[in-house]
Amino acid sequence: MTTASDPGAAQRAGRRARPAAPGDVAPPRGTALLRHRAPQRHPALLRRSALLFVAGLAALSYAWALDRDPLEPYYAAAVRSMSMSWHNFVYGAFDPAGTITLDKLPGAFWVQALAVRAFGVHTWVIVAPQVVEGVLTVLVLYRAVGRLAGPAAGLVAAIIVAVSPATVALNRGNISDALMILLLVLAADAVSGAIAGGRQGTSGRQGTSGRQGTSGRQGTSGRQGKLVLAAVWVGLAFQAKMIEAWLVLPAFGLAYLLGGPGPAARRVRQLAVAGAVAGLVSVSWMTAVSLVPASHRPYIDGSNDDSAYQQVFVYNGFGRFGDQTPLQLLAGQSLGIGSAAQTPAVAPDRLLRGGLGLDTGWLLPAAVVIAAWGIASRRRRPRGDPLRWCFVLWGGWLAMLAVTFSLTTTINPYYTAALTPAVAAVIGAGVAAAWSQQRSGAGRRIGLAVVVAATVAYAAWLVAAAGTSAPGWLVPAVIAVGLAAIATVLGSVAVSGGAALAAALTAGLIGVSLAPAVASAELVARHQGAFDTPFEPARVADAIDALFLRAPAQVELTIPRLRSAQDGAPYLLATQTAALASVFIYDSGQEALPIGGFTGTIPAPTLAQLQADIREGRFHLVLAATSTDPRLRWIAAHCTDLGSATAALHNYYCEPSDSG
């Protein structure tokens, strides 16, 4: 009891009994314990320093010798074309003349095209945006996970995503997935903020009567604003990678519906508004382009009726389940162009073996187990427990993408990089949950030892299955480090105190991260990029080099001869498929008219348009294989065959008089 004669006691009591301020958010229990047991000298500064070190390491691994890595030529050619005029830029035109678009939405390539427009056509200019996007993903993931699971969990997640082989390979190339992943992590950050920030409204209602309504309305509007922001990020991610960006929406919606503050009806309304915004932003470009007359814009590649909606929802969407993929259609054109690597057939364990396993499988089983344990172990917590909703949000992301990637007809290895933020976040949240429950008995530490042992054994199997392409010392090293980590974890069972548990968690993270970290370093050392997987067989690496390095180099040597035979025509030549045209466009910056779009099966240009182009002298040279396509059969019948350019391709010379 205090009196007026003891003001110091009153002050001390006031400090002890200070009510929650409207801006206060109760941190997860694990966060508080980590904060109290951390070194007291500037813990925030230490965390920020560690985060900056991780971001710097990520930047180094993504950007190391970035001008020596091969570009994907189709996307690189489109970026050069888009940088040449604002008309091409807006419509995402593939070729300099703007006759046809990319077979994807152009969102991610707008960033690359702006970079080329500013700094010129160089490999490093095209790759640099992905490097920046990858580093930003590391930083945003730290904040997103930290909102619900605490800063230590955020730092663990940042470390794991930075050294993931799939992430490193992706960010060393010119693929659109890097921007999509950044935008989706930004969306997850906004949803996490809406869940965690909801406690502000509750605190506010506990204040004085004069401020109850104001604080409540501000909390509600703030949460709605965060959800709308998340919806905008998802819509922009859709511009980068189409339907794949929507796969995370169920996870976001479920996490907020179950974990968000306020009445259920209000949460449903808030999610409905956010969903409408996500849909409107997603379809904005497609709708705007569809309203432009076909004669004033490029033909939409990937569609048979010049429809952006068909390109997105059929060719790049539901057609990927059972139908022939674009690469399979391209391989059927007898050009010797197709996928350089074979992905495993559709199967439940597809992501856990072969190249896909080496790319992203390392920690995937552990993340699935931790997510299930995290949700189950916190089921009795109050509904406002933020750590539980962290598991729901990121576990839902992981489940949606893993199931989808396991069912699609075929996938490229770099697709799996979209799994790594969720894997990293779940493991970071698992560390926070284990720390917050450190006094609950030895059972969870034994469980941790089992997870570490299984993950290390799986990593050793993956490396051994890679054969001689993996370093011979890696399997023994993985086993030795793993055994040390397991011993440390089991030793913590007999030693009480936070220091023992901290040592166990640290040793466990080192044990399970060694193999993927070495795999990432191997990718960087070998100057490999998005189409490569760690420790890939020599024949696969050679096939990728042939497609992305040697073939473009051979084309570059032929361009001077083509220019001499161009004979004053505005176009350098016409080619069967945009895939074949891409190497000429990127190297020369001149028009190589693509016949049939990327796959060679698209009805653009029509036979009448080709005849008109020849009649007007727009091009003389045509590079094509023997084909049943009526357009190519007409060229073979009416133009002069100059002989074989390769084993599969013929050179044709067309005079204006041949158009009849």
Image (cartoon, rainbow, N blue to C red):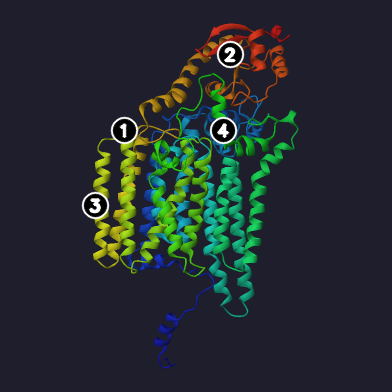
* Numbered disc in front, either 2 or 4: 2
The earlier-in-sequence mark between 2 and 1 is 1
Q: Which residue is mark 1?
A: 467
- Measure the alpha-carbon separation of dots 3 and 1: 25 Å
Residue 337 in the image, given as x and y percentages of width and height? 51, 22
Label placed on residue 117: 4
* Numbered disc in front, either 3 or 1: 1
The earlier-in-sequence mark between 3 and 4 is 4
CB contact under 8 Å: marks 2 and 1 = no
- Measure the alpha-carbon separation of dots 3 and 4: 53 Å
Residue at 51 percent of width and 25 percent of height: 338
Question: Disc 2 marks which amino acid?
Answer: Thr
Residue 163 in the image, given as x and y percentages of width and height? 38, 45
Q: In what element is the residue under mark 3?
A: helix
The crowding category of the residue bearing disc 1, from other C-alpha atoms within 10 Å (few below 14, some 14 to 19, many at least 20), is few
Q: Which residue is mark 3?
A: 484
Question: Disc 1 marks which amino acid?
Answer: Gly
- Measure the alpha-carbon separation of dots 4 and 1: 44 Å
